[in-house]
């Protein structure tokens, strides 16, 4: 009985399958957010994608690059501020690849390199500021760190879009010290406000006294108004001091009227 296929036919069949596998493997599909960096015999050839591309097997190699924004958590860093306060600070970093060629050729691992650079930059920038600036001026610090990282990663084809400081952790002793400082500041403000109120009140009292001194009958009207207010409380007995100086004007007016009448009589 003769074999179904001889050796030459088996070789041709295997070669056909091999060529078909090579042709099929030459077709690659890249998503909208992906790019393919093509190397031809080890040298950079071009950047392809997205969509259906052809990569010649054996002589061409492709490295996929993701162009989406990467959200990277920067681990907590021990930072000593300019006023010698030890704190732990962590942040979050937003960046993306804008040049696939640079991201693959100029740096070995752009994700690891960006993470390490973010950690060192975070420590160096925050070490130049006081603790109060870290707590109150985060937007300014975020902008400074973002600008430094963006400039240093430009050669890697990476764009740092944003940096956000998440937490500034203090030890218990520093928290108590800040609380005492805030309490002292509130007490100082209360004293200043109270003194300012006393000064304004004294100025108003002096102004009122000057007006009352200019018109003697004004103080009498003020006394009568006070009597009216007290009478509204339905008290059975009211003891109200009446300085004689208030009635001096009335008595003087009456005496002057009597003298005038006596002078008019023949």
Image: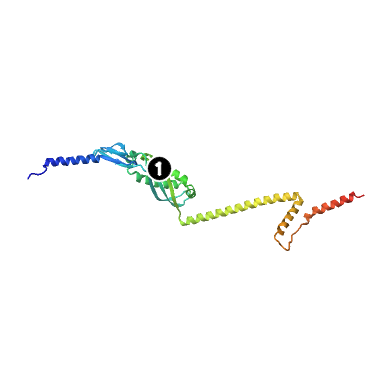
Q: Residue furthest bottom?
A: 236
Locate residue 237: give its quadrant: bottom right
**Residue in the foreground of this view, choosing between 112 and 63:** 63
Which percent across, then down, holds residue 225?
72, 55
Residue found 84% across the figure and 53% down from its top: 255
Residue found 13% across the figure and 40% down from its top: 9
What residue would you read off at disc 1?
A: 160
Question: Crowding near pointer 1: few (<14 within 10 Å), some, many (20+)?
Answer: many
Q: Residue 228 vs residue 186: left or right? A: right
Q: Secondary structure at mark 1?
A: strand
Locate residue 28: give its quadrant: top left
Q: Residue 179 vs residue 47: left or right? A: right
Which percent across, then down, holds residue 182?
53, 54
**Residue in the foreground of this view, choosing between 186 and 174:** 186
Looking at the image, residue 176 lies above or below residue 65: below
Q: Residue furthest top?
A: 45
Mark count: 1
Q: Residue furthest left?
A: 1
Looking at the image, residue 126 lies above or below residue 176: above
Q: Colour scheme used in the picture?
A: rainbow
Residue found 26% across the figure and 39% down from its top: 27
Which percent across, then down, holds residue 75?
39, 50
**Residue in the foreground of this view, choosing between 154 and 173:** 154
Looking at the image, residue 158 lies above or below residue 253: above
**Residue in the foreground of this view, choosing between 123 and 54:** 54
């Amino acid at each position: 009985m003769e074999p179904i296929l001889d050796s030459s036919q088996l070789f041709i069949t295997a070669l056909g399958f091999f060529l078909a596998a090579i042709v099929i493997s030459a077709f690659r599909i890249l998503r909208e957010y992906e790019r393919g960096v093509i190397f031809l015999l080890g040298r950079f050839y071009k950047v392809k994608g997205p969509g259906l591309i052809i990569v010649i097997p054996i002589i061409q190699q492709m490295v996929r690059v993701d162009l989406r924004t990467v959200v990277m958590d920067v681990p907590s860093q021990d930072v000593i501020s300019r006023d010698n306060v030890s704190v732990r600070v962590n942040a979050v970093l937003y960046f993306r690849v804008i040049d696939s060629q640079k991201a693959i050729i100029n740096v070995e691992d752009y994700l690891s390199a960006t993470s390490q650079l973010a950690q060192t930059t975070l420590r160096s920038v925050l070490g130049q500021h006081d603790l109060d600036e870290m707590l109150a001026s985060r937007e300014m610090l975020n902008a400074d760190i973002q600008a430094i990282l963006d400039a240093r990663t430009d050669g890697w084809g990476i764009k740092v879009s944003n940096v956000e400081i998440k937490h500034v952790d203090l030890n218990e002793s520093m928290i108590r010290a800040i609380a005492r400082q805030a309490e002292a500041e509130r007490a100082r403000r209360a004293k200043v406000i109270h003194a300012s109120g006393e000064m304004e009140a004294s100025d108003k009292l002096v102004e009122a006294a000057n007006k009352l001194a200019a018109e003697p009958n004004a103080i009498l009207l003020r006394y009568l108004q006070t009597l009216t207010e007290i009478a509204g409380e339905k008290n059975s007995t009211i003891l109200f001091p009446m300085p004689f100086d208030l009635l001096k004007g009335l008595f003087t007016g009456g005496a002057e009227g009597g003298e005038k009448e006596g002078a008019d009589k023949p």
